[in-house]
Image: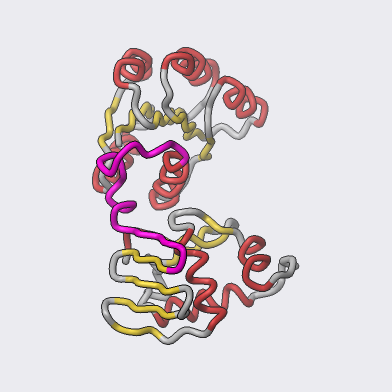
Amino acid sequence: MKIVLVEDDLSLRAQHESYLTQHGYEVLITEQSSAAELITATDPELVIIGLNKLGSDGLGLCRQIRPFVSSKILFLTACDDDIEHVAALELGADDFIQKPISLRVLLARIRMLTRRQPVESDDNQSSNQKNMQLHCEQLTCGNLKLDKKRKSCVLAEQSVLLTASEFDLLWLLASKADEVLSREFLVKAIRGIEYDGIDRTIDNKIVTLRKKLGDTPSLPRKIITVRSKGYLFSADRW
């Protein structure tokens, strides 16, 4: 998958290019002055406009390229002006991320955005998508195998004993891999009640799942806590 990165922070540019390249993306770097020409010539799956100030330059670039490419457009900006955010969305931007943001969360948002596009062939799928197979009753992600009908969990060929509610939570997280699922959504889906902002049932089950699945409690890498947002099942960690 091809990404064009327009980033005016040189340190962030290097970090983002290295991290995304490691995760299988082809990243093209460009200065803002030549960005429109490169983007229209390559029509990448995603354009990241990473500007410290959104301003007229960022909006102008979005306006310039939108009619000519089918790319998803993601703004990565330190700007917190709602008016400019709305203006960019009206010009055709698909999403906003406000700096600073962790690389793992950035990757998850990129996957969420690009997953909305139709997949034409297996060659166009990311390595993580190829590594994950979801059927009606079974799900395989790396070394993790889940069977919904039997409520069975196998990790690295070893059976993991889960309660019914623990399995249901893991299945829900895994079936929406690399998406941040809020506590409100999880409580409603698992317990059938509205989240009151106090109930820690889901959080406690996440702690238990991490222990049973060998995820380091102090630095979880498989089921990640996204501060103030919820939880994310990282597909490339199994």
Say if the magenta span includes residue 136. Answer: yes
Q: Is residue 27 above or below residue 214?
A: above
Residue at point 60% right, 57% down? 228
Q: Quadrant of the N terminus?
A: top left
Residue 206, horizontal then vertical, whole percent: 51, 74
Q: Is residue 154 above or below residue 37?
A: below
Residue 104, horizontal then vertical, whole percent: 40, 52
Residue at point 48% right, 18% down? 66
Using the rendered view, name the quadrant where residue 47 is placed: top left
Numbered range of the magenta stretch = 116-137
Q: Nearer the viewer, residue 95 or 152?
A: 152
Q: Nearer the viewer, residue 85 or 100?
A: 85
Q: Nearer the viewer, residue 18 or 140?
A: 140
Q: Nearer the viewer, residue 144 or 78?
A: 144
Say if the magenta span includes residue 230. Answer: no
Image colouring? secondary structure
Residue at point 67% right, 26% down? 83
Using the rendered view, name the quadrant where residue 71 is placed: top left
Q: Quadrant of the C terminus?
A: bottom left
Residue 175, horizontal then vertical, whole percent: 47, 61
Residue 127, horizontal then vertical, whole percent: 27, 50
How many badges with numbers are in the image?
A: 0
Residue at point 43% right, 14% down? 68
Q: Is residue 98 above or below residue 182?
A: above
